[in-house]
Image (tube, rainbow, N blue to C red):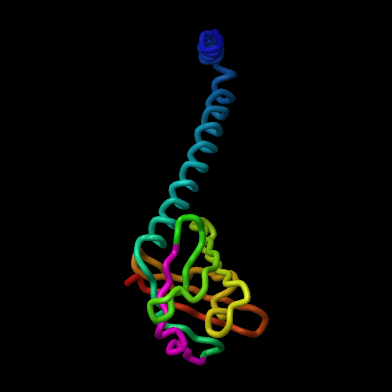
C-alpha cells in the first residue's frame, strides 16, 4: 500500500515539470548519503583487514630526529579486529593495548596502559603519511616533540 502511494507520488512529480528538479535532488541526496556511509564502512573494514592480517614490526622509529629503532628490535605486534593489539617481545606477549584506525582521516592510535619504555612511545594519535597493505608510515607531534614510525608487515 505504501509502495503504491510512493509510486503514484513519483509519477505525479515526474509529470509536473516544476517538481522534477526537487524530486531529482531528493533522490540524489538520499543516494549519496547512503553511499557515503557504505564507503565509510568499506574503508573501515579494509583498515581492520589490513592490520589484522599478519604481524607487524617497527622498522624505523625516530624521536626528535634521534633514531631509536633498535629499542624495538625484539618486538612484533599482532592487531586484532576487536581493536586490541599484543606487543610481543621475544615471542612472549609483554603487553596488550588498544588500537584504532580511521581511513577517512588517515589517522591511527594506540594505547598501552601503564607501559614502560619503549612501548609508551607508541601511545597516542598518529597521522598516517604513507601506507600500503604491507607498511604504514606515521607521524606524531605533541608540543615540540616529533616522532615518526614505520611498521612493516612480516
Which quadrant does the N terminus fall into? top right
Q: Nearer the viewer, residue 100 or 95?
A: 95
> At x 51% / y 56%, what residue is drawn?
104
Q: Nearer the viewer, residue 80 or 10?
A: 80
Q: Determine if the magenta segment contains residue 87.
A: no
> At x 50% / y 33%, what residue is drawn?
31
Q: Determine if the magenta segment contains residue 74.
A: yes
- How many labels sit on residues? 0
Instruction: Farthest residue to the bottom: give it.
Output: 66
> At x 39% / y 81%, what residue is drawn?
90
Instruction: Farthest residue to the front: give it.
Output: 92
Q: Is residue 105 above or below residue 75?
A: above
Instruction: Farthest residue to the right: give it.
Output: 143
> At x 46% / y 56%, what residue is drawn?
81
The magenta stretch is: 66-79
The spot of residue 96 in percent (x, y) is: 52, 69
Q: Is residue 73 above or below residue 57?
A: below
The spot of residue 47 in percent (x, y) is: 44, 57
Q: Is residue 4 above or below residue 78?
A: above
The spot of residue 52 in percent (x, y) is: 40, 60
Q: Nearer the viewer, residue 36 or 91?
A: 91
Amino acid at each position: 500500500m505504501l509502495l503504491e502511494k510512493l509510486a503514484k507520488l513519483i509519477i505525479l512529480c515526474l509529470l509536473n515539470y516544476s517538481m522534477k528538479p526537487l524530486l531529482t535532488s531528493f533522490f540524489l541526496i538520499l543516494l549519496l548519503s547512503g553511499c557515503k556511509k557504505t564507503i565509510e564502512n568499506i574503508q573501515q573494514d579494509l583498515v581492520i583487514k589490513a592490520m589484522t592480517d599478519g604481524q607487524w614490526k617497527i622498522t624505523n622509529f625516530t624521536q626528535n630526529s634521534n633514531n631509536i629503532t633498535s629499542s624495538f628490535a625484539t618486538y612484533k605486534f599482532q592487531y586484532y579486529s576487536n581493536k586490541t593489539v599484543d606487543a610481543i617481545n621475544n615471542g612472549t606477549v609483554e603487553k596488550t593495548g588498544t588500537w584504532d584506525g580511521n581511513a577517512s582521516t588517515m589517522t591511527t592510535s594506540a594505547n598501552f596502559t601503564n607501559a614502560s619504555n619503549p612501548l609508551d612511545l607508541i601511545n597516542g594519535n598518529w597521522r598516517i603519511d604513507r601506507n600500503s597493505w604491507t607498511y604504514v608510515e606515521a607521524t606524531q607531534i605533541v608540543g615540540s616533540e616529533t616522532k615518526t614510525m614505520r611498521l612493516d608487515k612480516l
